[in-house]
Amino acid sequence: MYLKEITISNLELFIYGFGVGFITGKNSTESDDYYFDDTKGFKNWFLKKKNITEVTFSSWDHPFLQEVNGDQKKALDLYFDYLEEYYLSQNKIKKK
């Protein structure tokens, strides 16, 4: 993965672009999408954990930024902390 600048906002754009390509190239009958699926993926897990009712694409990074007082780099680190917690809670990876 390459981000021109290491920020949560650039990650947001990267993930959106990846998601568009992923969904476009995928058979629409497949249901194994645990990241982008709003009902069972990371986004849904995170929103429930933070008691957030809804987030749009344009505000996707706001909860992370709010938690670290607007620091883009810290928000990016926080994102990956939550992503690891999500995968651990889903038994998708084991803690080292």
Image: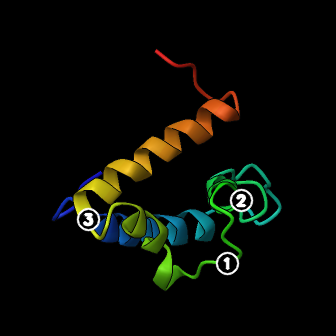
Q: Secondary structure at mark 3?
A: helix
Upstream in sequence: badge 2 or badge 1: 2
Instruction: Name the residue tied to disc 2.
Output: 48
> For the point 76% across and 54% down, which residue is it?
40
How is the rendered protein coloured?
rainbow
Going from N to C along the chain, the mark reached first, 1 or 3, is: 1
Graded by Cα atoms within 10 Å as few (under 14), some (14 to 19) or many (20 or more), the crowding at tag 3 reads some
* Mark 2 Cα-neighbour bin, 10 Å: few <14, some 14–19, many ≥20: few
Give the structural element (helix, strand or loop) at label 2: helix
Relative side of 44 to 39, left or right: left
| Cβ atoms at labels 3 and 2 below 8 Å apart | no
* Left or right of 39 on screen, residue 84: left
Q: Rounded to the nearest whole Å, what is the CA distance between mark 2 and mark 1?
A: 10 Å
The part of the image, by quadrant, that contains residue 88 is top right
**What residue does disc 1 label?**
54
Q: CA distance from mark 1 to mark 3?
A: 21 Å
Q: Amino acid at mark 3?
A: Gln
Q: Which residue is mark 3?
A: 72
What's the amino acid at mark 1?
Glu
Which class describes the residues within 10 Å of circle 1: few (<14), some (14-19), or many (20+)?
few
Secondary structure found at label 1 = loop
Residue pictured at 69% horizontal, 64% vertical:
51
The amino acid at mark 2 is: Lys
Residue sitting farthest toward the top: 96
Depth order, front residue of 38/20:
38
Q: How many marks?
A: 3
Quarter of the figure with residue 25: bottom right
Q: Give the residue displayed 62% in from the left and 60% down from the top.
A: 50
- The answer to whether mark 1 and mark 3 are in CB contact below 8 A is no
